[in-house]
């Protein structure tokens, strides 16, 4: 976990008198903020041994989800941090959706189409396979939790992964649509991609339970073209379908 890496350096440098942390959207970072609090309370204890992040995740899993599923929850968090190992990873598939839509727009208008590199599709397919494996284990763990813990597990672990996964599968289909010579198959793949993004819209609604209504709405920061606007892919693909197939 990056928190351990960064704060070990901070403590080793001797900068232990004052800390200011931006947690404007604390809901998504409760786990990490709690670890920061533990470090600030007693950094020497927190870093007395190696693998502080692993020990903390194991404690968190037992504390918040119970010992019966703690190992599975810990594994889920590790997969989360492996797949989304940098802030920009959440927008990888979203950007590929827009790139594929640009190519599709040129295709349907009979303009020159720049082929999408084969390694891009291969990378997305590998990402899809990682998500399938991760969610198989996560779903099995979730069924053994009471409803309140299921919801928190969904919001804190599953949902961020779903944001990228649904857009990953949509991007895969759109890239295949670009290369597809049959117009009917191109349309079919494009509509299927929208179905994946429609599923994501429903999953957003589950995360926007009271009192978090419209939590993931478009804002001046997450505007129409921002890769961090999680509705961007759906809106652009729907507009494309309306303009080219649904009129």
Image (cartoon, rainbow, N blue to C red):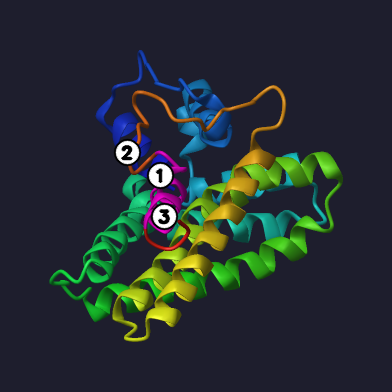
Magenta stretch, main secondary structure class: helix
Task: Look at the picture and state if 222 lies above or below 60.
Answer: above
Name the residue: 32% across, 38% down. 226
Tell me: 135 left or right of 43: right
Q: Which residue is mark 1?
A: 232
- In front of the other: label 1 or label 3? 3
Q: Which residue is mark 2?
A: 226
Asked if residue 238 lies in the magenta stretch, the reply is yes
Q: Secondary structure at mark 2?
A: loop
Q: Secondary structure at mark 3?
A: helix
In the figure, residue 107 lies in which quadrant? Answer: bottom left
Q: Which residue is mark 3?
A: 237
Tell me: 80 left or right of 209: left
Asked if residue 182 lies in the magenta stretch, the reply is no
Residue 29: x and y, percent? 52, 33
Tell me: 125 left or right of 33: left
Residue extent of the magenta highlight:
229-243
Sequence-wise first label, 2 or 1: 2
């Amino acid at each position: 976990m990056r928190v351990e890496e960064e704060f070990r350096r901070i403590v080793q440098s001797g900068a232990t008198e004052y800390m200011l942390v931006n947690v404007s959207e604390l809901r998504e970072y409760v786990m990490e903020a709690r670890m920061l609090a533990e470090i600030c309370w007693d950094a020497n204890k927190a870093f007395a041994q190696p693998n502080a992040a692993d020990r903390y995740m194991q404690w968190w899993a037992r504390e918040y989800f119970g010992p019966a599923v703690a190992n599975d929850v810990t594994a889920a968090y590790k997969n989360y941090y492996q797949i989304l190992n940098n802030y920009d990873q959440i927008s990888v598939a979203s950007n590929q959706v827009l790139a594929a839509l640009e190519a599709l727009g040129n295709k349907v208008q009979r303009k020159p189409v720049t082929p999408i590199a084969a390694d891009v599709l291969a990378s997305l397919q590998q990402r899809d396979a990682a998500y399938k494996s991760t969610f198989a284990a996560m779903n099995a763990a979730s069924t053994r939790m009471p409803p309140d813990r299921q919801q928190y597990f969904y919001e804190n672990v599953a949902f961020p992964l779903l944001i990228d996964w649904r857009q990953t599968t949509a991007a895969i289909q759109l890239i295949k649509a670009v290369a597809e010579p049959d117009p009917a198959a191109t349309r079919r793949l494009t509509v299927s991609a929208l179905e994946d993004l429609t599923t994501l819209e429903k999953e957003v609604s589950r995360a926007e339970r009271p009192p978090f209504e419209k939590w993931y709405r478009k804002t001046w920061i997450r505007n129409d073209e921002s890769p961090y606007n999680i509705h961007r892919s759906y809106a652009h693909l729907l507009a494309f379908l309306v303009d080219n197939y649904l009129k």
